[in-house]
Image (tube, helix red, strand yellow):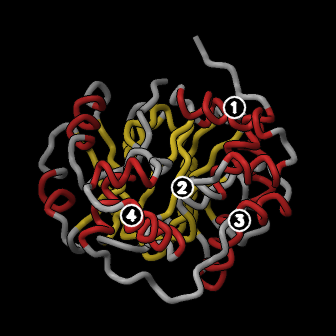
Amino acid sequence: MAQQPLDQSDLRLIAALQCDGRLTTERAARVLGLNARVVHRRLAALLGSGTVRVIAVPPHGSGSTAMLLRIRVLRGKLDTITAALAARPDIPFIDMSAGGDEITAVLLADGPRSRLVFRQLPATKAITSVSAQTVLHVYADATDWRLDALTEAERTGLTPAPPTSGPPAELGPLDRDLADALLDDARVTAAALAARTGHPESTVRRHLGSLLRDRALVTQVIVDPRRLGLHVDANLYLQVPPAHLDAAGRALAAHPAVHGVLALTGPANLSAAVWLRDLEDLHSFITRDLASLSITSVDTVLVGHAVKRPGRIPVGN
């Protein structure tokens, strides 16, 4: 049985958590103009039921070289191939197409010549073709996506001030302990983190504040988009003239329907991941929103099953 969409009050609280994953009840109530008891009860229900999770992850642009894979598979072999890919720790993202013949995956590769891409996948008889495009620039990922449920003033009031210093320093042993402890739940209290890591609470509180303030870690809200009324999940592969690529990437990153934008090598030099209410909204997005961005070609792939995405339990069809 399909779960009902969340109501507007819950959507506003989820959007508030997207601004600050460790947002307090008191601050949420003050900025949103809600009763603090109501906010406490609703947040407890959303988080306690698992409907919403808040995790902490490194900011995009850090870590290994990323490659976007599009893998064509013989019908009847899709489940076997996706299961094998999902078991790999260097593949954090896997989508299965609604048509049942294509897998989209993100590979965190050690270098431009990945053994998986150049040897293992081509040697698999169930795979008919592999396209591997290196990610040149991340305009936006899931940590940047914001549910369109707040006013600009509310979003500004809930979002922590940006860091004033340069890139965060390399994490020390304590910072790495905290980062590991926050992977599955970014709202763990400082006291619980101190107990879990064995460090003094005052030290934990200080380092945790620095990690989040300097954006060495960023919070991400995990929620099934269908509970938000967004039933269409699609990946779009776009061709954009080089002179217009950056402007198109930035414009898409700011669009409320877009939860990921990557500049890529290859003929489809920009990809966008979107969540929309229905197919009519997808049609409108393609024919209206994309039409003004100098895009010359659009390849649209509907997602039938989100097999693996960071921090989220996969959902079925």
- Quote the CA–CA distance across marks 2 and 1: 23 Å
Residue at position x 69%, y 36% in the image: 40
Bin the neighbour count of mark 3 within 10 Å (Cα to Cα): few under 14, some 14-19, many 20 and up: some
Lower sequence index among marks 2 and 1 = 1
Residue bearing the label numbered 1? 42
Local secondary structure at mark 1: helix
> Are dots 1 and 3 in contact, CB under 8 Å?
no
Q: Amino acid at mark 1?
A: Arg
Q: Amino acid at mark 2?
A: Ala
Local secondary structure at mark 4: helix
Lower sequence index among marks 4 and 1 = 1
Residue bearing the label numbered 4? 204
Q: Amino acid at mark 4?
A: Val
Where is residue 204? Give x, y as percent: 39, 63
Out of 304 and 54, give the one closest to the viewer.
Answer: 54
Q: Is residue 170 left or right of residue 302?
A: left
Assign the N terminus to one quadrant of the image.
Answer: top right
- Between disc 4 and disc 1, the foreground one is 4
Out of 220 and 239, give the one closest to the viewer.
Answer: 220
Bin the neighbour count of mark 2 within 10 Å (Cα to Cα): few under 14, some 14-19, many 20 and up: some
Residue bearing the label numbered 2? 142
Lower sequence index among marks 4 and 2 = 2
Q: Is residue 199 visible?
A: yes
- Between disc 1 and disc 3, the foreground one is 1
Q: Amino acid at mark 3?
A: Ala
Residue at position x 32%, y 28% in the image: 75
Residue bearing the label numbered 3? 254
Bin the neighbour count of mark 1 within 10 Å (Cα to Cα): few under 14, some 14-19, many 20 and up: some
Residue at position x 58%, y 40% in the image: 233
